[in-house]
Amino acid sequence: MLLPYLNPDVVEAGCDEAGRGCLCGPVCCAAVILPPDFECPELNDSKKLSEKKRSLIRPIIEENALAWAVAMVGPEEIDRINILNASIEGMHRALKMLSITPEHILVDGNRFKPFGNIPHTTIVKGDGKYMSIAAASILAKTHRDELMDKLASEFPGYGWEVNKGYPTKAHREAIASLGVTPHHRLTFRLS
C-alpha cells in the first residue's frame, strides 16, 4: 500500500528516473505533484507493472496531477558528467518545469543535490512506498520507452523496441556487429 505523502501539510513533489542502467538513450526524469485525494489503486513502482498497465496509468496521472513534468538528459551529457549527476540534473530540470513550486521534494534513491532552498528527502525504493514517486517512475519509464521505440525504427538491429537500451546479450551482440550509434553512452561498458 503506497503512502499519499510524507508530510501532509506541504506541497510535495515526487521525483524518479528511468534508464540509468541503459547503454544508450537518455536518462529520463519526472517530477509529479499529486492532489491530496488522488486515487489510483493500480499505482505502483513502474518496475512492478506491465508495459500495458503503465500505459493505462500514465494518462490518469497526467490528467489528475496538480503538476507534472518530464526532462531528459542525453548520452553526451551523461558521458560528460556521469550517470548519477545526469539523473540528478534531469530531476532538477523536471522540477524547474513544474507549474507549481513544491515545498518539499521526495526523491527515489539515496543521492540528491539540493534544489534551491526546497527541503528534500531521499527514500530508497521510494517508488514502492510513496504515490508521487511511483507516479514519477511511471511517467519517466513510459516517456523514455516511447522515445526508445521511435529510435528503434531509426536504428534497426539493436532491438531497442524490446530491450529499451538495457544491456541485454542481443543488444551487446548488435553493438559488436553494427557498431555504436550517436545514442550510445561511450563511457559505459558496451561489449
Image (cartoon, rainbow, N blue to C red):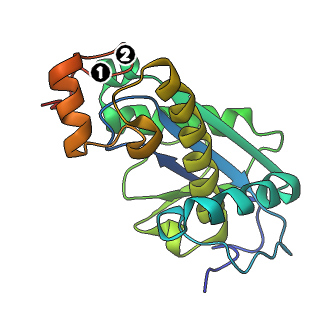
Q: Which residue is drawn at 37% across and 33% down?
A: 85
Q: Position of residue 102 (x, y in %)?
A: 73, 50
User: Which quadrant is home to the C terminus?
Assistant: top left
Q: Which of these two is toward me, 57 or 95?
A: 57
In the displayed structure, would residue 120 be above or below residue 146? below
Q: Residue at x 83, y 39 (%)?
A: 99
Label 1 sits on residue: 79
Amino acid type, mark 1: Asp
Label 2 sits on residue: 76
User: Which quadrant is home to the N terminus?
Assistant: bottom right
SS of the residue under disc 2: helix
Q: Is residue 89 visible?
A: yes
Q: Position of residue 185 (x, y in %)?
A: 29, 24
Tell me if 76 is positioned left or right of 30 in this view.
left
Q: Where is residue 58 in the image (x, y as percent from the top left)?
A: 72, 55
SS of the residue under disc 1: helix
In the displayed structure, would residue 142 be above or below residue 83? below
Instruction: Name the image quarter holding residue 12.
Output: bottom right
Q: Position of residue 144 (x, y in %)?
A: 55, 39
Query: Around disc 1, counting alpha carbons within 10 Å, would you say few (fewer than 14), some (14 to 19), or many (20 or more)?
Result: some
Tell me if 167 is positioned left or right of 9 in this view.
left
Amino acid type, mark 2: Glu
Query: Around disc 2, counting alpha carbons within 10 Å, would you say few (fewer than 14), some (14 to 19), or many (20 or more)?
Result: some
User: Mark 2 and mark 1 in contact (Cβ < 8 Å)?
Assistant: yes
Tell me if 36 is positioned left or right of 115 in this view.
right
Q: Which of these two is toward me, 93 or 139?
A: 139
Instruction: Name the image quarter holding residue 91.
Output: top right
In the displayed structure, would residue 145 be above or below residue 183? below
Tell me if 99 is positioned left or right of 13 in this view.
right
